[in-house]
Amino acid sequence: DAGITQSPRHKVTETGTPVTLRCHQTENHRYMYWYRQDPGHGLRLIHYSYGVKDTDKGEVSDGYSVSRSKTEDFLLTLESATSSQTSVYFCATSANRSYEQYFGPGTRLTVT
Amino acid sequence: AQSVTQLDSQVPVFEEAPVELRCNYSSSVSVYLFWYVQYPNQGLQLLLKYLSGSTLVESINGFEAEFNKSQTSFHLRKPSVHISDTAEYFCAVSERGYSTLTFGKGTMLLVSP
């Protein structure tokens, strides 16, 4: 499995505050992804990256931004957190387009 | 656009019984297919994948899935389940040439003694 870490693992924040989640990988995978997981919705793609500084929107990108300045790091930012963004966030990586993705342990975010 | 349907949100089964978790997809192009497993409070782990070749693929812990192109299905089966198989299972599809996976909403497998 790819070495993928996410930080923080848990976070509680207040509505309106900015939040940044970090994903770090040690496998030199080109592709990185951010998902959110909510009951009844499965996993939904927020944003993904296909190389350093190359990103694109996913299914549920509103209210989120991303940045990738190094191959190993992919940041997800909630500019102004809302209660609807309370979720579990997963990072994933892939070596090849269309092939399997490897997942990090997740970050549980609660917006109060 | 592709989509994935997992017909059962929850499947209860007794230990040592067989189980089938159903997955259907829609896509107009060639696809790759995956099953992931998620244990409580953990990330998703790849269980098995179909990329090409034999339509029957197997995992190391006794699960298997068969790609059926005519029925656009990729059902997951195990002949005899264990308590430790209790988890949520996700089917996913990617279209060849594209960078993203589409996931089903998951099936919770509940194995009881």
Image (cartoon, coloured by chain):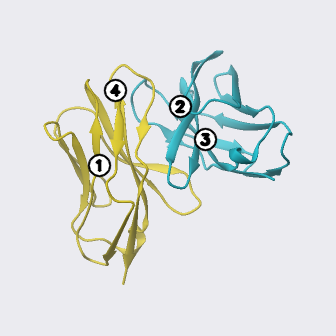
Chain colours: A cyan, B yellow
> Which amino acid, mark 2?
Glu
- The residues bearing labels 1 and 3 have C-alpha atoms spaced at a distance of 28 Å
4 and 1 marks on the same chain: yes
- In the rendering, which numbered label is found on residue A4? 3
Q: Quadrant of residue B14?
A: bottom left
Residue B62: x and y, percent?
27, 61
Query: Mark 3 or mark 2, which is nearer the start of the sequence?
Result: 3
Q: Nearer the viewer, mark 2 or mark 3?
A: 2
Q: Chain ID for label 2?
A: A
Which mark, residue B23?
Answer: 1
Quick one: label 4 or label 1, which is nearer the N terminus? 1
State the image coordinates of residue B10 (x, y, percent, origin top left).
39, 65
Q: Tag 2, which secondary structure?
A: loop
Nearer to us of marks 4 and 3 is 4
Pointer 1 indicates a residue of which chain? Answer: B
Q: Amino acid at mark 1?
A: Cys
Mark 4 and mark 3: Cα distance apart in space: 24 Å
Instruction: Name the residue located 85 percent from the left edge and 40 percent from the top edge.
Output: A16
Q: Residues within 10 Å of mark 3 (few under 14, many from 20)?
A: many
Q: What residue sits 24% from the left and 50% below the top?
A: B65
Structural distance between the alpha carbons of marks 2 and 3 = 23 Å
- Observer able to see residue B50: no
User: In the image, what residue type sits under mark 3?
Assistant: Ile
Residue A39's spot in the image, x, y percent? Answer: 54, 55
Looking at the rendering, which quadrant does residue B21 occupy? bottom left
Residue under pointer 4: B95
- Image check: B17 left or right of A34? left
Towards the viewer: B25 or A53: B25
